[in-house]
């Protein structure tokens, strides 16, 4: 495994994407930044992390025969791996807020940004970006963020957490990729935040509606039932509105 550790970079996902174009790095290449200056989140948001406190990493995965329609499995596998690491570190009440925010209770402690390289109908490779809050003990108010240290009162060596994460991620890829999508979905749904509950959602066009969060379908779309029907929503179509 090639580990590229940088003191500072704008975004490890962006760095790895450039490297992919210029140097054709091997499968499994990992880029880690001590200080990520312009971390990227989902839907064009920022990912802010104090220098040296947390894991900000990107991992290159190369594929053969993975259809674009199956791309959600990467988010599922990564979410399951992060959840397993957090359980190992005794983080309580680990849940996944669809599509791939990792929570303890209602507070977020890890964000995942998967960026896919597509050729025709197939995925060539993907950059799996993970921001995992490990030792940070203060976050800007309103972020609703937390860290392993805040939840367990223990500080951890980032290199060790990284080793655990990469090992478990590899195992989860072995277990599920090209093998058992159904069991991956089942494991993911067990962790799914607010599953079976009435939840408020906001659509991409800013409409609000309430429905029962049922689970995900085979393409990773969120299944929501309201009084009229059950509908599946893609990544960019709805967001959950968290209520206290
Ligand atoms: C989110 O929750 O919106 C996703 C956040 C993903 C953050 C990680 S940190 C490492 C990698 N590099 C980035 O620029 N983003 C991801």
Image: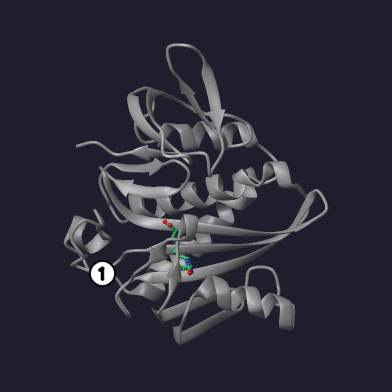
Q: Give the answer, above or below, for where 237 lies relative to 59.
A: above
Q: Position of residue 92 (x, y in %)?
A: 25, 46
Q: Which residue is mark 1?
A: 135
Q: Secondary structure at mark 1?
A: loop
Q: Position of residue 57 (x, y in %)?
A: 48, 70
Q: Position of residue 104 (x, y in %)?
A: 28, 47
Q: Give the answer, above or below, for where 42 lies relative to 31.
A: above
Residue 140 location, quadrant: bottom left
Q: Give the answer, above or below, for where 225 lies relative to 53.
A: above
Q: Nearer the viewer, residue 212 or 54?
A: 212
Q: Give the answer, above or below, for where 146 lies relative to 238.
A: below
Quadrant of the image for the N terminus? Answer: bottom right
View extreme (top): residue: 228
Residue 35 location, quadrant: bottom left
Instruction: Decide if residue 9 is on the left or right side of residue 148.
Output: right
Quadrant of the image for the C terminus? Answer: top left
Q: Position of residue 62 (x, y in %)?
A: 71, 62
Instruction: Decide if residue 143 is on the left or right side of residue 95.
Output: left
Ligand 1, by image quadrant, is: bottom left
Q: Nearer the viewer, residue 189 or 15?
A: 15
């Amino acid at each position: 495994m090639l580990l590229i550790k940088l003191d500072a970079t704008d975004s490890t996902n962006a760095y790895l994407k450039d490297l992919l174009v210029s140097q054709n790095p091997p499968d499994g290449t990992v880029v880690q930044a001590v200080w990520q200056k312009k971390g990227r989140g989902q839907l064009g948001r920022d990912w802010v992390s104090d220098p040296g406190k947390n894991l900000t990493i990107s991992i290159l995965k190369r594929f053969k025969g993975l259809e674009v329609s199956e791309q959600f499995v990467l988010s599922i596998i990564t979410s399951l791996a992060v959840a397993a690491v957090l359980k190992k570190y005794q983080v309580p009440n680990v849940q996944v807020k669809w599509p791939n925010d990792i929570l303890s209770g209602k507070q977020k402690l890890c964000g995942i940004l998967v960026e896919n390289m597509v050729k025709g109908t197939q995925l060539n490779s993907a950059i799996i970006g993970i921001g995992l809050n490990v030792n940070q003990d203060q976050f800007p108010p309103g972020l609703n963020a937390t860290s392993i240290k805040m939840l367990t009162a223990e500080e951890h060596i980032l290199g060790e957490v990284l080793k655990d994460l990469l090992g478990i991620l590899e195992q989860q890829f072995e277990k599920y990729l090209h093998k058992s999508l159904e069991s991956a979905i089942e494991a993911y749904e067990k962790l799914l935040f607010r599953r079976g509950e009435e939840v408020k959602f906001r659509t991409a066009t800013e409409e609000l509606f309430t429905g029962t969060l049922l689970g995900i379908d085979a393409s990773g779309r969120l299944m929501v039932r309201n009084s009229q029907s059950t509908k599946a929503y893609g990544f960019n179509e709805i967001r959950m509105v968290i209520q206290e």
